[in-house]
Image (spheres, grey):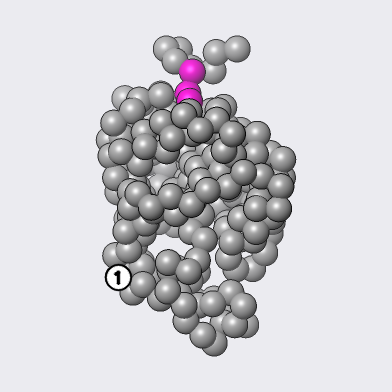
């Protein structure tokens, strides 16, 4: 079955968003500027009340592989799961609505997975902009370096692997590390070091900053 007029996407990029119009353009443009073209971008609006869709609509005019869906506010884990369910690619990638990909982010990971076909999930490889410390999920009174964390934006894996995991669990904080822990129990997981995901820590109201007990 063909979902798009001219191609079948190899990679589905899931971009959850909530009232981040001022940052969303940076994220979306970074996908458009990838050095590979066989992707679809799925923007899932978690019930925001800004006019993010006005920007998305403007780029959809030239990129019919960009989808936009909106649902009532369900928080980040379930928003990402919505994207997974409606995705069509062989592989899945994730992008924060205030972060961005370097131009070779998708191609490096796709080539690696196509070469080492026994792998199910990759993670790692991040360039940090701003404060490199976040709250420890095991003790929110403490700070740990991001290098010690699992950052969901760096996840890249087979769609079937995320379906087997039944997506992200609806936990209060660090749903990405919780998924990775489950994945390591029965999937073939590998860390990579290519710093092609740019993680911005200076965004107001980010969950890593505002989370409390």
> Which residues are the magenta region?
8-12
Which residue is drawn at the image coordinates 36% and 33% (left, top)? 107
Q: Give me the residue at 40% from left, 47% from top.
A: 52
In this picture, residue 54 sits left or right of residue 77: left
Dominant SS of magenta comes to loop
**Residue nearest the observer in this picture, 201 or 90:** 90
| Residue 10 located within the stretch drawn in magenta | yes
Picture layout, residue 138 above or below residue 201: below
Q: Nearer the viewer, residue 135 or 83?
A: 135
- Crowding around mark 1 (Cα neighbors within 10 Å: few <14, some 14 to 19, many 20+) is few
Q: Nearer the viewer, residue 181 or 91?
A: 181
Residue that appears at 55% across and 30% down: 117
For residue 55, which quarter of the picture?
A: top left
Q: Position of residue 23 (x, y in %)?
A: 33, 55
Residue 16 visible within the image: no
Q: Which residue is mark 1?
A: 130
Position in image of residue 27 (x %, y %): 35, 47
Where residue 146 appears, as percent x and y from the top left, is: 43, 68
In the displayed structure image, the side of residue 42 where residue 133 appears, left or right? left
In the picture, measured across the screen, residue 159 lies left or right of residue 102, that is right
Query: Left or right: where does residue 20 sit relative to residue 127?
Result: right
Question: In this orientation, which residue lies closer to the viewer: 1 or 188?
Answer: 188
């Amino acid at each position: 079955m063909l979902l798009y007029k001219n191609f079948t996407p190899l990679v589905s990029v899931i971009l959850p968003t909530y009232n981040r119009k001022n940052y969303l353009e940076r994220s979306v443009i970074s996908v458009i500027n990838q050095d590979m073209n066989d992707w679809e971008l799925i923007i899932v609006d978690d019930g925001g009340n800004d006019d993010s869709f006005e920007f998305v609509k403007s780029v959809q005019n030239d990129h019919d592989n960009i989808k936009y869906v909106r649902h009532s506010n369900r928080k980040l884990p379930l928003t990402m799961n919505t994207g997974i369910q409606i995705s069509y690619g062989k592989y899945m990638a994730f992008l924060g609505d205030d972060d961005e990909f370097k131009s070779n982010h998708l191609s490096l990971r796709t080539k690696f997975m196509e070469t080492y076909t026994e792998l199910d999930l990759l993670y790692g490889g991040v360039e940090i902009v701003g404060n490199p410390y976040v709250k420890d999920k095991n003790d929110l009174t403490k700070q740990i370096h991001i290098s010690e964390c699992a950052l969901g934006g760096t996840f890249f894996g087979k769609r079937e692997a995320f379906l087997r995991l039944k997506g992200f669990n609806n936990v209060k904080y660090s749903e990405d590390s919780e998924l990775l822990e489950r994945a390591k129990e029965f999937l073939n997981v590998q860390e990579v070091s290519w710093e092609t995901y740019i993680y911005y820590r200076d965004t107001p109201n980010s969950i890593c900053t505002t989370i409390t007990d």
